[in-house]
């Protein structure tokens, strides 16, 4: 089976970084392995996403007024990209080796995500909700189209499964031990929407 972008980023990418860290004789590493901590970072949103991931590509479509629907009962943990970066910096300074920290600000409904992005830039928000099982069927058709066209489409079955997979989580430990105080993810979503709108205008 061909390794997809998700595998290359999270498995091969981690392996490469660990090898470099080991060769550099580092005594701190924020992710996993070595005398380190694991940072479990939720879906990140914010400005500056030049090559958007699938979940931020959906946000960009909403900011352009091209998302007429949302998926019912679909929510995922989320956090602003700046807050995620701050959490990693704090972990490098205050972490307890061997610990794991949840880096997420809120459990965000897809409807709220898309509506926030659209309304931030004056675009039309999605009006219609579709059932999750039907969304999986649409994504399955998209998987077939992606193979035929030999390119990635906006939302695949794997992307939807990742959004639907994780339960609600708590970041109390990161707040208590690292002093992490994230801002509202909705603010980061608004910033991302403005960013994508400006990128579209300059192209």
Image (cartoon, rainbow, N blue to C red):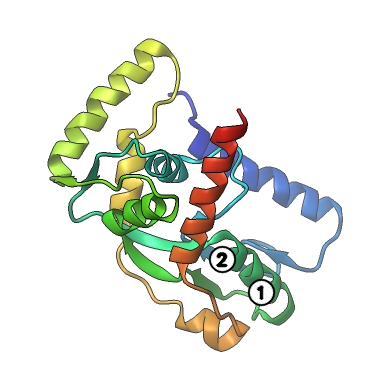
Q: Is residue 1 above or below residue 170?
A: above
Q: Secondary structure at mark 1?
A: helix
Q: Are marks 2 and 1 in contact (CB under 8 Å)?
A: yes
Q: Nearer the viewer, residue 192 or 8?
A: 192
Q: Secondary structure at mark 2?
A: strand
Q: Position of residue 93 (x, y in %)?
A: 74, 78
Spot the residue most to the top: 148
Spot the residue most to the bottom: 176
Q: Position of residue 187 (x, y in %)?
A: 49, 65
In terms of sequence position, does the residue under pointer 2 or pointer 1 come before the other? 2
Distance between the Cα atoms at labels 2 and 1? 8 Å
Q: Nearer the viewer, residue 83 or 61?
A: 61
Residue plotted at (27% across, 54% down): 111
Residue 15 — which label?
none
Q: Could you tell me if residue 131 is visible in this image? A: yes
Q: Which residue is mark 2?
A: 39
Q: Position of residue 4 (x, y in %)?
A: 48, 30
Spot the residue most to the front: 122
How crowded pointer 2 is (Cα within 10 Å; few <14, some 14-19, many 20+) is rated as some
Q: Which residue is mark 1?
A: 91
Q: Nearer the viewer, residue 63 or 43?
A: 63
Q: Could you tell me if residue 11 is visible in this image? A: no
Q: Is residue 153 above or below residue 11?
A: above
Residue plotted at (54% across, 88% down): 176
Q: Is residue 38 above or below residue 121?
A: below
Among the 4 quarters of the image, the one containing residue 170: bottom left
Q: Position of residue 138 (x, y in %)?
A: 21, 30
């Amino acid at each position: 089976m061909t390794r997809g972008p998700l595998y290359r980023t999270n498995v091969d990418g981690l392996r490469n970084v660990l090898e470099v860290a080991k060769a550099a004789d580092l005594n701190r590493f924020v992710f996993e392995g070595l005398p380190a901590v694991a940072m479990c970072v939720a879906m990140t949103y914010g400005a500056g996403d030049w090559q958007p991931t699938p979940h931020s590509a959906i946000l960009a479509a909403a900011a352009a007024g091209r998302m007429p629907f949302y998926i019912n009962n679909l929510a995922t943990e989320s956090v602003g990209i700046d807050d995620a970066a701050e959490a990693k910096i704090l972990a490098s300074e205050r972490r307890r080796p061997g610990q794991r920290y949840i880096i997420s600000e809120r459990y965000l409904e897809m409807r709220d995500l898309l509506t926030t992005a659209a309304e931030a830039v004056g675009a039309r928000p999605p009006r219609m909700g579709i059932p999750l099982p039907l969304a999986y069927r649409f994504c399955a058709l998209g998987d077939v189209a992606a193979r035929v066209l030999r390119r990635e489409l906006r939302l695949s079955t794997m992307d939807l499964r990742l959004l639907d997979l994780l339960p609600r989580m708590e970041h109390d430990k990161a707040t208590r031990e690292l002093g992490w105080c994230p801002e509202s993810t909705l603010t980061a979503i608004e910033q991302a929407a403005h960013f994508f709108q400006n990128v579209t205008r300059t192209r």
